[in-house]
Amino acid sequence: MTSTRPPLLAIRDLAKRYGDDVRSVEAIRGVDFDIREDEFVSIVGPSGCGKTTLLKCMAGLLEPTSGTVQFRGRVVHSTPAELAVVFQDYSRSLFPWMSVHDNVLLPLRKRRDLAGKALLVQRALDAVGLSAFSAHFPWQLSGGMQQRVAIARALAYQPKVLLMDEPFASVDAQTRSELEDLVLSLRAEFGITVVLVTHDIDESVYMGDRVVVLSKPPTTVQESLIVDLPRERDQIRTKELPEFARLRGQVYRAIKHGERTLLSAASTSPEEQRPERALQSPERTPW
Amino acid sequence: MRTPTRPGQEPTAIASAAGRPQRMTAVGTTNRGRAGAAAPGQITTRPVRRDPLGSPLAPVVLGSLGCVLALTIWELASQLGAVPSADVPPPSTVLPTLAEELAGERFWVSIGHTLTQWAAGFGLSIVVAVPVGLLLGSNEATWRAFRPLVEFFRTVPGNALIPLAILLWGLSLQSVVFLTVFGCGWSLIVQTMYGVHDVEQEARNTAAAFRLSRLERVRWVILPSALPYIVTGLRIASSTALIIAVSAEILIGVPGIGQDIALTRTGGQVDRMYALILASGVVGIVIDVVFSRFERHFLRWHESQRRWAEK
Amino acid sequence: MRFARRYSDLILEIAATAALLAGAWVYLAGDRGYAWVSVPEMLGAFKDAWLFDRFSSDVVPSLSRLALGFGVAVLLGIAVGVALGMSRVIRMLALPVVSFLRAVPAVALLPLSIVLFGIDSAQKVAVIAFVCSWPIVLNTADGVASLDSTMLMTARSYRLSRLELIRYVIAPGIVPRVFTGMRVSISLAVLLLVTSEMVAATSGIGFFVWQAQLTFSIADMWAGIILLGLLGYTLNGAFLLLEKRFCRWNTEMKGNRS
C-alpha cells in the first residue's frame, strides 16, 4: 500500500501557542503527520489536547505559531478550495434563516452552472436521506438530522478532503452509529479522503484506516496506528473481531500511559516516513 | 400583543465593546477571554503576538482618544467655517462657558429642579405601577382582561397629554408628575405583568412540589423571578421620565435645565445652550449608568437562578 | 373545551375594554370641569377634524416628517452600526461619544435644532433622524459583534466572498437586533414629533393639539390626543407584525429551544 505520490495534506512541525509571552498556553508543540489520498485518518486524544486546534490549523482557519500545513504541496493560509469542514456544533454552523436546501446550496453560490448545482444539492440530500426535508429549516430538525444536513452541505461541495471535528459528539449513541456508517458509505461512494477528530476511541478505530493518537498539551503525536481491519465495516461484526479489541486497547493505552506506550515495531507501519517526535524526547510528554 | 423587553435587551451602551469576552467577527479581529490569555479553541487569524486590544486599558485609552477626536473635529469644523460658527460655536468657547455654569449657583438650582421633578414622577410611577402590575399579572383572568388595555396606553406618547396637564394643573410639580406617571407607568405595568405572568407556570409547579403557601410562593418564587423584568423596566422608564421632565420644562415652563436651554435660545446665548445640553447629557448618562448597573446585577443573579430552575 | 376557553378569553378582553369605555362615557357625561368634554363630543370633534378636514393640513405633514426622519435614522443607523460592529477598534473609539449622544434627553436638543434648522419640517426631520439613529446604531453594532463565531468560521471554511458573507450571513443574522433598535426608535420618534410640533411649528397633529388648548377648543384638543394615541399604537403594532414576519426564524428557533 506504499504510495509514491506526495501526501495530500502534510502537517510539518506544527506548533500553536496562545497568549503573549508572559501568560501563554502552548496548545500544540510539534505535530508531524501525513494524510494520503483516500485515507481515512482518525485523530484521537485526551480531552483538552488541542484536537480542535489542530483541525482548524489543518483547515486553514487558524494560523499556526510555527510549522506548516501543506495541501498538495502548497502552504495553507486559508481553507483550500478542495477541503470542507464539518463542525461539532451543527446548530451553530447551519444558518437558521435558510432552509435545508439553501444551506446546502450556499457554498456552491459561486458556481455558474445552475442545473449542475441543483443536481449536486439533490444528490447530497438524497445521499444523507433528507431529500424530503429540503424545504424545512434546520431548527425544525433533530440533532442527528441537522448534522446530516451539515454533511450533505460538505458533500455537495465535492471536496477532496473532508475534515470532521467531533461531528457525532452531540448526538445520541444510536444516531451516532447511523451517522458513522453514513460517513463510511459516502466515503466509499464518493472517494473522499477523511480526517475525523474524535474523543471516542471505539469510533476512531471503527472508522479509520489509521489512528493518530495525540498527547496531552503541549500536544505532540503520541502514536500512529494502522488499523488492520477489513475495509467493509459493520457495527456488530467488526467490533466483535479480536483485532478490533486489540487495537482499541492499544489506542486506549496510548492515550493513558504516555511514555510507557507499547510502541512495538508492529504498530508503526513501515510507511510512516517521518519519525515521531515523541519517541525522540520523552520529556515532551510530561505525563 | 407585544413581547416585553426581556431582561438584558436593548443595551444602552455597546456592551460588547469592552469588558465582556467577545467572539470573533468576520473581519478577523482578535479577541480574548477576561484573563488575558485566550482559552484553547478560540480563534485568531493573525500570528499571535501581544494583543494590545485585549488589555483592560484599551477601552479607556481608545475611548478617550475617541472623545478627543470628536472634540477636535468639532473645533475644526467650527473654526474653519465648515459649519456657521454663530450657530455651532467651537468647544473652545463652549467648554469654558460650561465651567462657568458649573461654578455658579444658578446651574445647580436648575439641575436640582429637574432631578426633583424626575425623581418625584419616576418614584410615583414605580409606587403605582409595580403593585398594579403584580396584581394584574398574578391571575390569568386579569391578565387576559387588562393586557390589551395596558398595551394600548403604553404606546400613547406621554407628551401628547401636556396640553391636558397645563389645563389641569398649570405650571406646577403636579403637572410633571402626572405626565411622568402616564408616560412611564404603563410600560412599567406591562413589564411587571409579564414578569409575574411568565413565572406563574413554574411557580405553580414549584409551589405544588414544595407545598408553599400563597405568601411564601410570592416571596420566594414569583418575586425573585419577576424582579429582572421589573428592573429592566425601571432602566427604560428612568430615561423616559427624564425626557418627560425636560419636555415639561420646555413646554410648560416649570423650572429646570430644560427651561434654561429654551431660554438661551430666546436670549441668543448659543454658547450657553451648548454647555447646558452637554450638562444634560451628563445627567442622562449618570441616570443610565446607575440603572444599567442595577439591572446587570439583577440579571447575573437571574441567569444563575434560571439555570438552576431549569435543571 | 378549548374553544370555550378561547371564547372566554375574548369575552374578558372585550369586557374590560368595554367597561372602561362605558365608564369613561358615563363619567364624562356630567360636567367634569373645563378640561373635559363628553365622549360624544370628543368623537364628533375627531370626525370633524381628521375625516378629512384637517387631514392634509396636519396629518400628512406629521406623518411625512415621521417617515422621513425615521427612514434616515434607519439607514444611517444600520450603516454606522455595521461599521462599529465589524471593528473592535472603532467600537472602542466611538463608545463614549455615542453613549453620550444617546444619553442626552432628546427634547433638550429641540431649541438647538430650531436655531440650526428653523421651525419647519426640516427641523423636525433632522431631530428625529439624529436622535432615533442611536438606538439603531447600538443594537446593530451589538448584533454584528455578537454574530456566532462558529457560523462565521463555517462561512470562512467554505470560502464565501466578502459580499456573499454580508448578503447571506451578516445581513440576515442581524435583522432581529435591527428590529429591536427600530422598535425603540419608533416610539422615540413619535414622542419627538409630537413635542417638536408643540414647541414650534406651523402645522402637524401636535401643533393642532397645542393650538386647540391655547384657544380652549377642548373637544379638538381631545380629538388630537386620541389621534396621537392611535398613531402610537398603530405604529407599534405595525413594527411588531413586521418583526414577526421577518424574524420568524429567530422567534421560532428560540421557541423551539425552550
Image (tube, rainbow, N blue to C red):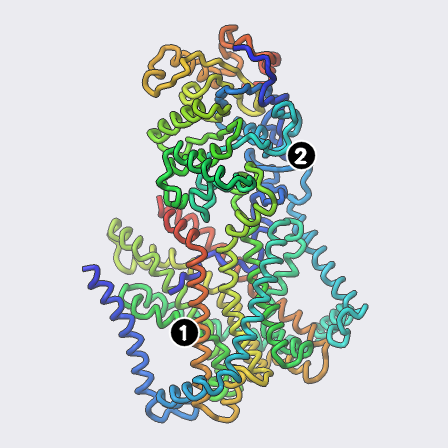
Q: Is residue A180 above or below residue A144?
A: above
Please tell me the numbered disc located at residue B47: 2
| Mark 1 residue type | Phe
Tell me which residue sits at (57%, 76%) in the image.
B246
Q: Quarter of the image holding residue C97?
A: bottom right
Residue C230: percent from left, percent from top: 43, 76
- Residue C15 position in % (x across, y down): 27, 74
Q: Which mark is residue B153?
A: 1
Q: Residue at x 52, y 91 (%)?
A: C214
Q: Nearer the viewer, residue C188 or B63?
A: C188
* Mark 2: few/some/many CA within 10 Å (<14, 14-19, 20+): some
Q: Position of residue B299 (x, y in %)?
A: 46, 54
Q: Position of residue B29 (x, y in %)?
A: 63, 43
> Which chain does the numbered disc 2 sit on?
B
Instruction: State the SS at label 2.
Output: loop
Q: Is residue C40 above or below residue B1?
A: below
Q: Residue furthest right?
A: B80
The foreground one among A230 and B150 is A230
* Front residue of A245 and A81: A81
Estimate the spatial distance between the alpha carbons at disc 1 and disc 2, rounded to whole Å: 56 Å
Residue type pointed to by label 2: Pro
